């Protein structure tokens, strides 16, 4: 999608998988000594996006219980607009797994570039902090 605005939603083949959950700007405070954005910062943004999506899907509080298949594909640079997409991969009785992808627009322009993907699993909790069945 060269030059096209990023409106979220399910994209055509080759684009992001799932719904846009968050969009943020990569800032200098989040860089490593080489000047790239820390992988941990990207992972944190992905967990935030997944958590937002999981709360909506679960109908209440959730906690992250695992992150698997994390793949850092390309560096993120200062000034990149980071867009994180979530897609439901699996749903269980008390847990759900989301496939989460981070894409960037270099300096907020041009084609989207996939930089990271992973699967995050969340468990729904009740008011006592115990696992609860997911909302129907």
Image (cartoon, rainbow, N blue to C red):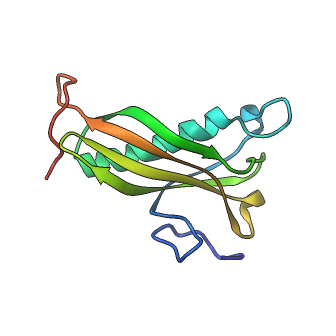
Residue 87 locus on image (x, y percent): 41, 58
Residue 127 image point, x, y percent: 17, 27
Horizontal side, residue 23 vs residue 66: left or right: right
Query: Image quadrant of residue 123?
Result: top left
Q: What residue is at 53 percent from the left and 77 percent from the top?
A: 12
Q: Quadrant of the N terminus?
A: bottom right
* Horizontal arrangement in the rendering, residue 119 relative to residue 95 (left or right): right
Q: Is residue 88 above or below residue 120?
A: below
Q: Is residue 76 above or below residue 1?
A: above
In the displayed orientation, state which residue is furthest to the right: 34
Q: Toward which corner of the image does residue 31 lie, by quadrant?
A: top right
Residue at 67% x, 55% y is: 81
Task: Give percent across and percent down for residue 136.
Answer: 13, 53
Q: Residue furthest top?
A: 128
The residue positioned farthest toward the front in the image shown? 69
Q: Is residue 116 above or below residue 62?
A: below
Which residue does the image show at 78% across and 31% down from the upper left?
A: 32
Q: Which residue is at a point 36% across and 46% down the rendered structure image?
A: 97
């Amino acid at each position: 999608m060269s030059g096209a605005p990023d409106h979220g939603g399910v994209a055509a083949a080759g684009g992001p998988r799932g719904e846009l959950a968050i969009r943020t700007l990569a800032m200098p405070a989040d860089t490593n000594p080489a000047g790239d954005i820390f992988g941990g910062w990207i992972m944190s943004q992905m967990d935030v996006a997944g958590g937002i999506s999981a709360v909506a899907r679960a109908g209440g509080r959730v906690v992250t219980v695992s992150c698997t298949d994390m793949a850092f594909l390309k560096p993120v640079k200062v000034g990149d607009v980071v867009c994180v997409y979530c897609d439901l991969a699996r749903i269980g009785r008390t847990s759900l797994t989301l496939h989460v992808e981070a894409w960037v627009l270099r300096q907020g322009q041009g084609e989207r570039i996939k930089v990271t993907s992973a699967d995050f699993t969340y468990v729904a909790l009740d008011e006592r902090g115990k696992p609860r069945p997911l909302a129907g």
